[in-house]
Amino acid sequence: MNVGPTEAIIALVIILVLFGGSQLPKLAKNLGKAQKEFKDGLDTGHADTEPTEVRRDTNTSIAPTAPTTVDPAHRDVPPGSA
């Protein structure tokens, strides 16, 4: 959504009429504070969710398993139809 200069001027005039000239500095200050707090909260949230380094044991080994045998009576039966 692109806001052209005409739309921006209309929005500023509406804000000026609604809030009055004396309230605009307070409104801008509060918006600036809210934006700063929001960014600080995002930074804090990202710092809390950064993954920690996981140390893996490099000396792990998998024990060999015994070979499986097939029952000759069930050799021609497709899986799942028994």
Image (cartoon, helix red, strand yellow):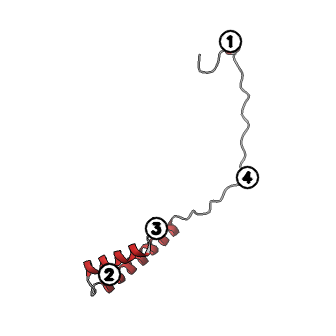
Q: Secondary structure at mark 4?
A: loop
In the figure, 29 relative to 62: above or below?
below
Q: Residue at x 59, y 21 (%)?
A: 80
Q: Secondary structure at mark 1?
A: helix
Give the amino acid at mark 1.
Ala
In the figure, 60 relative to 16: above or below?
above
Q: Residue at x 47, y 68 (%)?
A: 45
| Image spot of residue 4 (x, y percent) | 44, 72
Residue highlighted by disc 2: 27
Q: Residue at x 67, y 56 (%)?
A: 56
> Looking at the image, is mark 2 or mark 4 nearer the viewer?
2
Q: Quadrant of residue 15?
A: bottom left
Residue highlighted by disc 1: 73
- Pointer 2 or 1: first along the chain: 2
Q: CA distance from mark 3 to mark 1?
A: 73 Å
> Looking at the image, is mark 2 or mark 3 nearer the viewer?
3
| Image spot of residue 63 (x, y percent) | 72, 40
Q: CA distance from mark 2 to mark 1?
A: 84 Å
